[in-house]
């Protein structure tokens, strides 16, 4: 009886912590209208244009939401351009949400354009973006738990801008509830593991475009469940995504043993994999407590056994971001993207390719 009481108390505490943590990430976020385009043009701002594939249903209540939390049986496509204020007017690594839409482009993230596309228009837009930017590399991003559609759009735009990433950015948005409570967390996990097929469909669409020569897939948190299922689905259909060369898994809310099992099942033709983790990731420690204490991949100590040997055997390159500090350990890679990109560049400059010598973590550099 006492044990049951302690279990209930622990579950309640974890639920409260999960709610507080999730809500902290969306402080000052407007409830509606963020994706309504602003007509105000400012020369000093930067713009990031994202191509999007989503399994969310179109929003019927808020035109500034574009896509809701409800699932759709078919993939929908869109293109959104986000205006980002000058670095002197914002904290690099953060999203400056407007107090009310559409916001002031001098100091806020603002939507410059937002358009629904069909499948053919998506392909044409991908080709146009590649030609206009003189780039042939695409980066597909899969967001995590507690993300509304506008959350995912603005976060990815921030990541691309602050990292100065020379890619054509493509977002895959699955129908997360965008709410930080235990029920939504459990719901999101179920949806995430069912979203691999649509992700594989989007990867196939990008892979088939002649203007794209290389694809990098980036997943965050629970989105890494989507990534694993997507690659499993693609392999089960008798093939690989030929242009997919690199996969970056950031703060993955994935069981360690499950990850290693699925990576091993991918065989030698899988893409190179880089793991970005933080040993002080509070969100993943909460997730662990909600999952009967099962070890999460994103907060292990990669220098300890059996993790060190298992990662080295699968040639997973590890970047330990624990030493970077900051308030939000779960989103550290996005807030400190310039530093993270510097780590990658230094590693490659030393001749170490992705997938080589996972035991030498970034914290030792």
Image: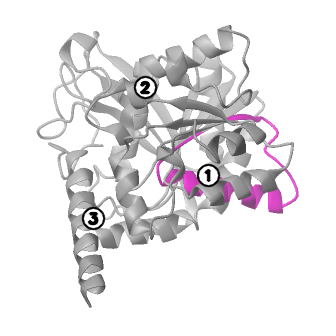
Say which mark, if any, is on residue 14. Answer: 3
Residue at mark 1 to residue at mark 2: CA–CA distance: 24 Å
Q: Position of residue 36 (x, y in %)?
A: 27, 42
Above or below, comparing residue 162 to residue 261 in the picture: above
The stretch of residues the image draws in magenta is: 218-246
Residue that appears at 51% across and 52% down: 223
Residue nearest the observer in this picture, 5 or 224: 5
Is the residue under label 1 in contact with that under label 3 (CB below 8 Å)?
no
Residue that appears at 59% across and 11% down: 346
Q: Quadrant of the N terminus?
A: bottom left
Query: Does the magenta run of residues contain 297?
Result: no
Mark count: 3
Left or right of 54 in this view: 33: left
Left or right of 63 in this view: 100: left
Marks 3, 1: nearer the viewer: 3
Q: Position of residue 196 (x, y in %)?
A: 63, 60
The first of marks 3 and 1 along the sequence is: 3
Considering the numbered disc 3 on the image, is that residue within a helix, a strand or a loop?
helix
Above or below, comparing residue 36 to residue 253 in the picture: above
Residue with the mark numbered 1: 227
Q: Is residue 314 visible?
A: no
The first of marks 2 and 3 along the sequence is: 3
> How crowded is the residue under tag 1: few (<14 C-alpha within 10 Å), some, or many (20+)?
many
Is the residue under label 2 in contact with that under label 1 (CB below 8 Å)?
no
Considering the numbered disc 2 on the image, is that residue within a helix, a strand or a loop?
strand
Marks 1, 2: nearer the viewer: 1
Considering the numbered disc 1 on the image, is that residue within a helix, a strand or a loop?
helix
Left or right of 116 in this view: 5: left
Residue with the mark numbered 2: 48
């Amino acid at each position: 009886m006492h044990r049951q009481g302690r279990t209930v108390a622990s579950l309640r505490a974890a639920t409260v912590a999960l709610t507080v943590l999730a809500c902290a990430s969306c402080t000052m976020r407007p409830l509606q209208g963020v994706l309504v385009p602003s007509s105000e043009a400012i020369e000093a701002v930067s713009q990031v244009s994202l191509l999007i594939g989503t399994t969310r249903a179109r929003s019927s209540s808020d035109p500034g939401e574009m896509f809701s939390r409800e699932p759709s049986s078919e993939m929908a496509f869109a293109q959104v351009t986000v205006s980002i204020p000058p670095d002197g007017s914002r904290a690099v690594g953060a999203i400056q949400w407007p107090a009310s839409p559409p916001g002031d482009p001098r100091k806020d993230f603002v939507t410059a354009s937002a358009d629904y596309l069909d499948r053919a228009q998506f392909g044409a837009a991908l080709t146009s973006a590649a030609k206009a930017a003189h780039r042939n590399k695409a980066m597909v991003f899969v967001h995590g738990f507690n993300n509304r559609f506008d959350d995912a759009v603005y976060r990815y735009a921030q990541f691309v801008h602050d990292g100065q990433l020379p890619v054509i950015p493509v977002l895959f948005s699955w129908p997360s509830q965008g709410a930080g409570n235990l029920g939504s967390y459990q719901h999101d996990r179920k949806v995430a593991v069912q979203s691999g097929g649509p992700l594989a469909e989007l990867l196939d669409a990008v892979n088939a475009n002649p203007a794209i020569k290389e694809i990098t897939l980036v997943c965050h948190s629970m989105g890494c469940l989507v990534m694993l299922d997507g690659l499993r689905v693609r392999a089960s259909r008798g093939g690989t995504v030929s242009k997919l060369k690199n996969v970056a898994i950031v703060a993955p809310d994935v069981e360690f043993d499950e990850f290693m099992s699925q990576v091993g099942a991918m065989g030698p033709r899988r893409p190179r994999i880089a793991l970005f983790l933080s040993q002080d990731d509070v969100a993943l420690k909460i997730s662990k407590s909600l999952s009967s204490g099962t070890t999460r991949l994103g907060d292990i100590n990669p220098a300890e056994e059996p993790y060190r040997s298992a990662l080295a055997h699968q040639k997973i390159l590890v970047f330990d971001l624990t030493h970077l500090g900051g308030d939000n350990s779960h989103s550290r890679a996005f807030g400190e993207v310039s530093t993270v990109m510097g780590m990658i560049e230094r590693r490659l400059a030393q001749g170490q390719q992705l997938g080589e010598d996972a035991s030498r973590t970034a914290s030792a550099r």
